[in-house]
């Protein structure tokens, strides 16, 4: 089994590392959060600098907030790439743009190092349960090399195409997920304002065409006003910004997504960025002058 380096131990990264450790994968971890590192060291991981991870690990996984941080971790002074040797593989599971992924691919290719963009869907629950979905861009040989670890961390992994394809797929995923949450929020505000129990509305429609993984995940959170983040608004705000930047570059009009970005901007201005994206409902609540809440059991 390969020695794995894992950089980025946040909401997603830490439970992913725990699943790797449970499966007996030798793991070296790094993060600016020492508490997260210590928690993983206590259950079998080792701690290392970026350069040490580059030197000692066969495969390096990054799960970081944005593309700039990924590039800094890899290519800055004392970064991972300073100690990488030919034949190693970097797999970035962060949500970034295709341009950022292709930059890393091309720069690492010159060193003889493989690179995959493999962003995930499934949020914190999927990271904890090991049921994430991986959307992969890169070369087939690198995908096959990563496959045993995708199988530990997720329930599905698909090589979509060349470098950058995984990142594009994740942006498409984020459009669908975030607009769905906004639609669920708007509908439950309507029900509440009309005097109907929003939880009962959810239970009535979930078995029909309106039913979805998003509805099942977010409607109960909205009705119980549970905005503890599994997917922070701040991260989704970054993703939707990346969607619009990519769309504008290739002349794809995205009017609904542009409106969603302004919804997120409103929540940013009112201090909600560290909440779960179920918190989108608060935007619609302010417009309608109503609070969505239900005492009905889930």
Image (spheres, rainbow, N blue to C red):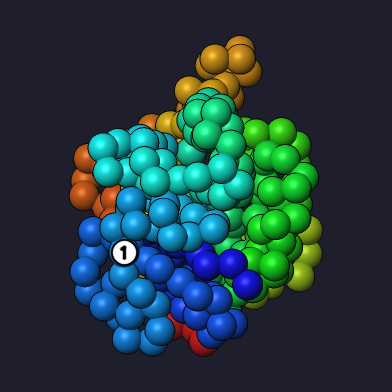
Label 1 element class: loop
Question: Picture quarter containing residue 73?
Answer: top left
Q: Is residue 290 visible?
A: no
Q: How many numbered marks does the figure carry?
A: 1
Residue at point 22%, 40% (across, down):
269
Question: In the displayed structure, does residue 213 sit left or right of residue 285?
Answer: right
Q: Position of residue 21 (x, y in %)?
A: 50, 80
Q: Is residue 152 visible?
A: yes
Front residue (pair 112, 205)? 112
Q: Position of residue 24 (x, y in %)?
A: 56, 83
Question: In the displayed structure, does residue 230 sit left or right of residue 202?
Answer: left
Relative to 182, does residue 138 appear above or below in the rendering?
above
Count residues near mark 1 (Cα–Cα under 10 Å), then give few for <14, some for 14-19, many for 20+: some
Front residue (pair 91, 160)? 91
Relative to 191, does residue 163 appear above or below in the rendering?
above
Residue at point 49%, 55% (across, down):
60
Question: Picture quarter containing residue 44?
Answer: bottom left
Look at mark 1 in the image and give the residue it sits on.
48
Q: Position of residue 173 (x, y in %)?
A: 62, 45
Residue at point 63%, 72% (across, down):
1
Residue at point 60%, 47% (across, down):
87
């Amino acid at each position: 089994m390969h020695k794995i380096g894992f950089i980025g131990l946040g909401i997603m990264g830490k439970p992913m590392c725990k699943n790797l450790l449970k499966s007996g994968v030798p793991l070296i971890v790094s993060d600016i959060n020492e508490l997260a590192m210590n928690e993983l060291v206590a259950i079998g991981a080792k701690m290392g600098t970026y350069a040490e991870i580059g030197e000692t690990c066969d495969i390096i996984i990054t799960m970081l907030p944005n593309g700039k941080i990924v590039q800094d971790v890899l290519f800055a002074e004392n970064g991972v790439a300073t100690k990488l040797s030919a034949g190693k593989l970097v797999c970035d599971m962060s949500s970034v743009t295709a341009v950022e992924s292709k930059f890393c691919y091309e720069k690492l290719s010159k060193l003889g190092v493989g690179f995959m963009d493999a962003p995930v869907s499934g949020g914190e629950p999927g990271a904890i349960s090991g049921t994430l979905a991986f959307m992969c861009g890169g070369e087939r040989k690198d995908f096959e090399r990563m496959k045993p670890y995708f199988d530990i961390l997720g329930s599905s992994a698909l090589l979509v195409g060349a470098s950058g394809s995984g990142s594009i797929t994740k942006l498409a995923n984020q459009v669908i997920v975030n607009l769905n949450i906004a639609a669920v929020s708007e509908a439950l505000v309507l029900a509440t304002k009309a005097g109907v129990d929003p939880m009962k509305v959810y239970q009535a429609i979930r078995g029909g065409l309106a039913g979805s993984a998003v509805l099942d995940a977010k409607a109960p959170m909205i009705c119980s006003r549970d905005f503890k983040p599994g997917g922070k608004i701040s991260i989704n705000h970054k993703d939707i910004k990346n969607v619009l930047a990519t769309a504008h570059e290739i002349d794809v009009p995205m009017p609904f997504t542009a409106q969603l970005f302004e919804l997120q901007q409103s929540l940013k201005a009112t201090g909600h960025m560290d909440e779960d994206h179920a918190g989108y409902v608060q935007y619609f609540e302010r417009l309608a002058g109503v609070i969505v809440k239900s005492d009905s059991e889930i």
